[in-house]
Amino acid sequence: MSTPAAVEITGLVKRYGSATAVDGLTLTAGRAQITALLGPNGAGKTSTIEICEGYRRADGGTVRVLGLDPDRDARGLRPRVGVMLQEGGLPPAVRAGDYLRLMASFHAHPVDPGVLLARLGLTGSARTPCRRLSGGQRQRLALAAAVIGRPELVFLDEPTAGLDPQARHATWDLVAELRSCGVSVILTTHFMEEAERLADQVVIVDHGRLVAEGTPAALTGTDGQLRFRAQPGLNTDSLLSALPGGTAAKESPEGHYIIEVAGRVDPQLLAAVTAWCADHGVLAKDLRVESRTLEDVFLELTGKELRS
């Protein structure tokens, strides 16, 4: 008998009155993988995760977490799943170390709280009440609480929000270590670099529907970009006429130019761009070769407008 997926969602629907937050969503998150669930505000991510965690009931479709129904089988599922609470879930008057020891007491074989405190740079804050922790410290404490019970599956909601670079990299290392130990991770984040760095599988949702899924490499593809800065208003049609076929040129934003090519940027393309700039008296600044990023894909699929 095959092992069930970490999370399997089929035709999920969730409504709030006349508004449909999740509209027939279908996705699968594999075992011992990091799956990043991405989408703009209002895309249905939170509702989907809360249904998986057993905090909300679906209005349609099916959800299986570790092969179980998160609503009907909640008692058997909870000891196997870790959930990262946002800072509002931490008891304000309880000391950080005491809170983590309390969470450890709920599990049969917890990680040593002292080890987790040290790993996440919280040893010096162990005697500090949660309300006096910085935002970043609360984030790290919430992460520690989510993983202290050695879960088979952990849901991480914006795990590095508000963290400094050192704490962010320590968190990334811990999440990668969870995967190497066979733990399945469902990650929600607005930090595209985080998703691109950590995720084995990326799922992008918008308006409650699946719009793309795949590995970061598959979603970003192999297309290359050549970028440079110069005075605004260059004639991109003239530039394009000097370049090999299959390329595109645009100015976005003002004074920033992007040359896109199917495949990798080669020396011939670079030479053609610099030659055109020299012929037209253009000083190209910050000339660099880049690959298409997950953020590029995300914006193409979900749009660039701000959402509340």
Image (cartoon, grey):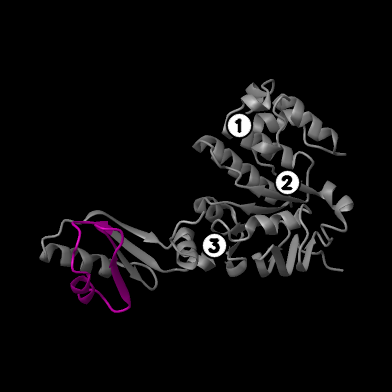
Q: Earlier in the sequence, mark 3 or mark 1?
A: 1
Q: Earlier in the sequence, mark 1 or mark 2?
A: 2
For the residue labelled by badge 2, is the local secondary structure a helix, a strand or a loop? strand
**Camera-side residue: 21 or 156?**
21
Residue kind at label 1, given as amino acid type: Gln
Q: Earlier in the sequence, mark 3 or mark 2?
A: 2
Q: CA distance from mark 3 to mark 1?
A: 29 Å
Q: Which residue is mark 3?
A: 216
Between disc 3 and disc 1, the foreground one is 1
Q: Residues within 10 Å of mark 1 (few under 14, many from 20)?
A: many
Q: Assess whether mark 2 and mark 1 are in contact (beta carbons under 8 angstroms).
A: no
Residue kind at label 3, given as amino acid type: Pro
Q: Which residue is mark 2?
A: 83
Q: CA distance from mark 1 to mark 2?
A: 17 Å
Q: CA distance from mark 3 to mark 2?
A: 24 Å
Residue 289 on image: x %, y % = 33, 59
For the residue labelled by badge 1, is the local secondary structure a helix, a strand or a loop? helix
Q: Which residues are magenta?
A: 228-257
Q: Which residue is mark 1?
A: 137
Label total for image? 3
For the residue labelled by badge 3, is the local secondary structure a helix, a strand or a loop? helix
Residue 48 on image: x %, y % = 69, 59
